[in-house]
Image (cartoon, helix red, strand yellow):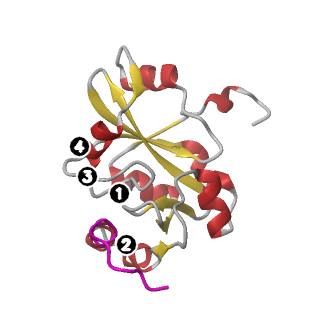
């Protein structure tokens, strides 16, 4: 599928190629509608919601923290604070997200930011052979793997979801 020209999407495609993942760059999809939620992205692509890697930016003691959660998990901010050794993790404003990622909420890619971000990658994503992440625009996604997400972001694999404390999940 060809991708319409968009500065953010082009930057992500370039970053994927530079990271040695030309297949991920070639797999970028530009969808008909915004997919600002995991459920919308999963429906548009035709995959389980858990195979969507949500890029969530938090404020961790004043610094940005990128958390890539499985679409079927909600991040536990208390758990995140303990994982990164900070006192408080809270919701970031849209301006904070744009300042630290260069991208708008709903289209934040796991890569392509002005500077590297401290990143946690939900280990639940490892259950899926292919995961989908935003590609720099609310209508764009790209396919990758859990292992490639960890490598691409320089992130740390972690159990970040509220539901993971429930043995039935």
Q: Look at mark 3 in the image and give the residue it sits on.
A: 102
The crowding category of the residue bearing disc 3, from other C-alpha atoms within 10 Å (few below 14, some 14 to 19, many at least 20), is some
Is 23 rendered above or below residue 68?
below
Q: Look at mark 1 in the image and give the residue it sits on.
A: 152
Q: Is residue 89 left or right of residue 102?
A: right
Residue lying farthest top? 87
| Residue 128 visible to the viewer | no
Q: State the CA–CA distance, disc 1 to disc 4.
A: 20 Å
Where does the image place residue 56, in percent across and percent down from the top left?
44, 41
Q: Are marks 3 and 1 in contact (CB under 8 Å)?
A: no
Residue lying farthest front? 33
The segment highlighted magenta reads 1-11
Return the mark for residue 21.
Answer: 2
Q: Observer-nearest residue: 125 or 106? A: 106
Q: Secondary structure at mark 2?
A: loop
Q: State the CA–CA distance, disc 4 to disc 2.
A: 26 Å
Q: Is residue 119 left or right of residue 163?
A: left
For marks 2 and 3, the one nearer the N-term is: 2
Q: State the CA–CA distance, disc 2 to disc 3.
A: 21 Å
Q: Is residue 85 left or right of residue 47?
A: left
* Residue 40 figure quarter: bottom right
Q: Are marks 1 and 2 in contact (CB under 8 Å)?
A: yes
Q: Secondary structure at mark 3?
A: loop
Where does the image place residue 13, in percent across and percent down from the top left?
33, 72
């Amino acid at each position: 599928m060809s991708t319409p020209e968009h500065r953010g999407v082009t930057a992500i495609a370039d970053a994927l190629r530079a990271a040695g993942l030309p297949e991920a760059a070639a797999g970028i999809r530009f969808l008909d509608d915004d997919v600002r939620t995991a459920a919308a992205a999963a429906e548009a692509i035709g995959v389980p919601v858990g195979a969507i890697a949500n890029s969530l930016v938090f404020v961790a003691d004043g610094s940005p923290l990128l958390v890539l959660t499985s679409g079927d998990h909600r991040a536990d901010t208390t758990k995140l604070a303990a994982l990164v050794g900070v006192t408080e993790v809270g919701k970031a404003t849209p301006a904070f997200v744009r300042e630290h990622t260069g991208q708008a909420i709903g289209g934040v890619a796991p890569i392509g930011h002005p500077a590297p971000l401290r990143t946690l990658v939900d280990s639940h994503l490892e259950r899926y052979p292919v995961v989908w992440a935003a590609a720099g625009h609310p209508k764009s996604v790209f396919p990758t793997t859990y292992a490639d997400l960890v490598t691409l972001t320089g992130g740390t694999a972690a159990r970040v979801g509220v539901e993971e404390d429930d043995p039935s999940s």
